[in-house]
Image (spheres, helix red, strand yellow):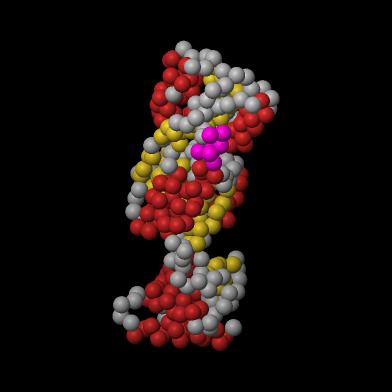
């Protein structure tokens, strides 16, 4: 252990000759060089801050800053009351990203894969899912806070969640998917649901009018956006169309000449299974509409009509934020994808 720590001091002291590096950069590079030269391995301890101060004569703040950056890159970790340890030999890793989402659905995977492709292989992305549960969100937050260089988070709109997020510096936090107001200095790439969904319903008015009734399955107290159901009810009333909102689809309850609209993918699949079992055809015997587009919905039953934001675009913009850390405030459009089912 002492030999390993001595090698760190030697690597850092060797870099004293370089005038182009600041002290905290010399500390970082010295530790990375020791790992590259296999003088340090995973789980090896690093010198304490006090030992670094004593051996190098650097300010405590400089050492803490260097260790913090190495933690954010995912190269070292701080273990409570036990000091700092090497956790990765990937010294080329430039940063470590925490990506916190509602759940890993097919359209969310598009976001993740695009982000991963655009930031590059040397950046580590850790995935977390809160399932719209504030208690789970809080537990995740306390686990990850202070251990990443960038936090990309789909928030839950509560005061407690807002309070937690305000504890992250604006340069390190990007809000995605759902908007939450953290002030003008914070970045976001989000959807807008109320006006956007109403506009989509207007586009579909003629298609809806060809059927007897529009049935929207919407689950309260879930991650599904409340704004969509508000717009749906407003649209029906304004256009004097027959329709209703039900909490969930009951298998076997399908009727011809209705439009069935759901946000929930498993529910969509249950509807389509019943359609197939009855030998009916979407777009002829009944209409089907879904939210959040993905490649599966392009193929299912000859194509399902959807409306959606571009989740790949969210991933692209999130990657840009990770690289340049400049303020980004984007509300992405929602588009209608008309296919055979409606």
User: Could you say where residue 87 lies in the image, as x and y percent from the top left?
Assistant: 56, 70
User: Residue 63 or 220: which is nearer the viewer?
Assistant: 220
Looking at the image, residue 100 lies above or below residue 4:
above
Q: Residue at x 62, y 35 (%)?
A: 269
Residue projecting furthest to the left:
19
Q: Quadrant of residue 40?
A: bottom right
Q: Position of residue 243 (x, y in %)?
A: 54, 17
- Relative to residue 76, is residue 287 depicted above or below? above
Magenta stretch encompasses residue 193: no
**Residue drawn at 38 percent across, 47 percent down:** 187
Q: Looking at this view, name the residue that lies furthest to the top.
A: 240
- Residue 103 position (above or below residue 262): below
Q: Position of residue 304 (x, y in %)?
A: 52, 33
The residue sitting at the front extreme is: 279
User: Is residue 65 shown left or right of residue 184?
Assistant: right
Any magenta on residue 301?
yes
Viewer can see residue 78: yes
Residue 329: give x, y in percent of width and height: 36, 44
Asked whether residue 216 is in view, the answer is: no
- Say which of 299 and 322 sits in front: 299
> In the image, which residues are magenta?
296-302
Specify the principal SS of the magenta part: helix
Residue at figure coordinates x 51%, y 58% from the top left: 125
Compare residues 71 and 303 and report the one nearer the observer.
Answer: 303
At x 39%, y 50%, the residue is 317
Quarter of the image with the N terminus is bottom right
Please tell me in which quadrant of the rendered image residue 22 appears: bottom left
């Amino acid at each position: 252990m002492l030999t390993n720590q001595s090698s760190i001091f030697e690597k850092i002291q060797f870099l004293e000759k370089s005038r182009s590096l600041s002290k905290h950069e010399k500390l970082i590079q010295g530790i990375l060089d020791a790992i590259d030269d296999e003088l340090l391995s995973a789980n090896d301890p690093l010198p304490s801050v006090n030992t670094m101060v004593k051996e190098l004569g650097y300010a405590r703040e400089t050492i803490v800053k260097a260790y913090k950056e190495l933690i954010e890159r995912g190269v070292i970790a701080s273990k409570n009351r036990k000091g700092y340890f090497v956790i990765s030999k990937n010294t080329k890793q430039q940063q470590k990203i925490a990506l916190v989402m509602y759940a890993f659905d097919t359209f969310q995977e598009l976001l993740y894969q695009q982000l991963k492709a655009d930031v590059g292989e040397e950046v580590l992305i850790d995935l977390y899912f809160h399932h719209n549960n504030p208690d789970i969100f809080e537990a995740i937050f306390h686990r990850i806070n202070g251990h990443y260089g960038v936090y990309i988070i789909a928030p839950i709109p509560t005061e407690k969640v807002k309070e937690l997020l305000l504890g992250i510096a604006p340069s390190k936090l990007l809000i995605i998917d759902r908007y939450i107001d953290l002030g003008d200095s914070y970045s976001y790439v989000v959807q807008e649901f109320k006006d956007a969904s109403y506009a989509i319903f207007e586009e579909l008015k003629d298609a809806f009018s060809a059927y007897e009734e529009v049935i929207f399955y919407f689950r309260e107290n879930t991650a599904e956006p409340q704004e969509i159901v508000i717009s749906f009810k407003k649209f029906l009333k304004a256009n004097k169309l027959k329709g209703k909102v039900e909490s969930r689809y009951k298998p076997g309850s399908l009727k011809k000449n209705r439009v069935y609209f759901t946000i929930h993918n498993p529910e969509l699949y249950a509807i389509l299974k019943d359609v197939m079992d009855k030998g009916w055809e979407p777009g002829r015997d009944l209409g089907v509409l879904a939210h959040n587009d993905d490649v599966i919905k392009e193929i299912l039953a000859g194509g399902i009509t959807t409306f959606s934001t571009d989740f790949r675009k969210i991933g692209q913009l999130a990657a840009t934020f990770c690289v340049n850390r400049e303020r980004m405030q984007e509300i992405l459009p929602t588009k209608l994808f008309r296919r055979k089912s409606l």
